[in-house]
Amino acid sequence: MIQDLWTSLLAFSGQFIVPDWGALVALIPIGLALLVFLYLTWTVFRFATAGPTTRGVHKLPPVTPAGIHMPGPSFAPVLAAFGMFMFLFGLFSGGPWMWIGIAVLVITLLYWGREALRDYDHTVHADDAPIVGALPAPTDRTPPPGVHVPPPSFRPLLISIAFTMLVAGMVFGGWWLLLGVVAMAVTLLGWLRDSRREYAAVEDADRTGHLDLGGAPSWPKATFAVLALLIVGGLVLTTSIVPDTGSGTASPSGGPAGSGGPAASGGASAVPSLPASDAVLVAQNIAYLQTSITVPAGKPFKLAFDNRDTVPHNVEIKDTAGASQFKGEIFSGPAVKVYDVPALAAGQYTFNCTVHPNMTGTVTAQ
């Protein structure tokens, strides 16, 4: 009994000492969803308990202060959040889901834009008459006394570009992920620098009475150049423009098709020595080198998977209806694993990497 308890304790602690990183990475979306749910719950609770909302059994309607325009309730933010979720889901799922996600995001953003324009027209241009209680229109471009208006900035545009690069890195992995993180760091640090400068200018205005924010910003040529260099660097590093002198760069064409044997004699081996298997699949530069493989039908077979990337990959086999027939272990390379795949009926199947859905191919069982 004590031995069983000790064995169970070792097995539990082993999850933290040598964790399954693939499983932990797969739990990240669930953790983020939990954090978002807790934040929304906290927000709803704070809103529901913010001040008196009833008098006796009757609800108190909210009263907007004079001179303040409050837009009416809208489902647009919720719909836009759903559209963003569908877009990200489509990026990670690939195939038609990506186009469905883009369409849903565009529709929800157009809906939000239509509501915003309608609200603006009814508020500012209602019968071309000033709104009761509204502030008078400024006669020049100078903010009213005591009001601080932040200057125009390119930072939101730069952050959007960097965030796009980061999302692309999450989808394609490898160098793109690292370059996306660098782009986000560069743009966020630039925005933080601008905010610090603006805050210092406001503090000076408290002493001097004059707020000097420097006028219209100049084009951020240096930041644009850095982002352009990162994009070009990603293309160079992921399209094999720079030759890889490592030992695992050769195509597996030197050996028999679909086998794990060595290359033909009479020269250097074109592939590293692989375990005996019925079929071979190689992943390199976030892509399968083989777009189709042939396996024996009606009996279990061995699939040697050679992951030459430093990012995690695996192999999942699906039938024509999209049902999973086999899902291999996710692991990072350079490494080779031999999957024991159960018997497949004769016919056509597809294979893909569950981490990078853009990596696909076909399987023929015969």
Image (cartoon, rainbow, N blue to C red):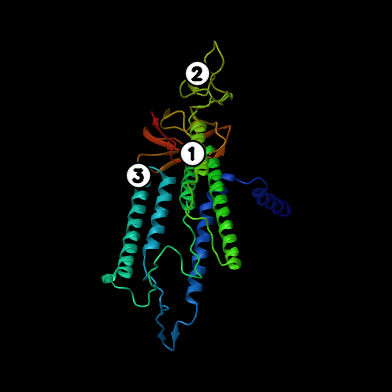
Say if residue 247 shows up in the picture.
yes
The furthest residue to the right: 2
Q: Position of residue 9 (x, y in %)?
A: 69, 53
Q: Secondary structure at mark 3?
A: helix
For marks 2 and 1, give the one nearer the viewer: 1
Say which residue label 2 marks.
Answer: 254
| Contact (Cβ within 8 Å) of mark 3 with mark 2 | no
Q: Residue at x 56, y 67 (%)?
A: 209
Q: Position of residue 64 (x, y in %)?
A: 41, 77
What amino acid is labelled 3 in the image? Pro
The furthest residue to the left: 127
For marks 3 and 2, give the one nearer the viewer: 3
Position above or below: 46 against 258: below
Towards the viewer: 110 or 346 = 110
**Which one is earlier in the sequence, the residue at label 2 or at label 1?**
1
**Which one is earlier in the sequence, the residue at label 3 or at label 1?**
3
Towards the viewer: 164 or 118 = 118
| Contact (Cβ within 8 Å) of mark 2 with mark 1 | no
Crowd around label 1: few <14 · some 14–19 · many ≥20 (10 Å): few
Say which residue label 3 marks.
Answer: 96
Crowd around label 2: few <14 · some 14–19 · many ≥20 (10 Å): some
What amino acid is labelled 1 in the image? Ala
What amino acid is labelled 2 in the image? Gly
Screen quadrant of the C terminus: top left
Q: Give the CA distance from mark 3 to mark 2.
A: 36 Å
Position above or below: 233 against 244: below
Q: Secondary structure at mark 2?
A: helix
Q: Which mark is residue 323?
A: none
Say which residue label 1 marks.
Answer: 228
Q: Position of residue 232 (x, y in %)?
A: 49, 35
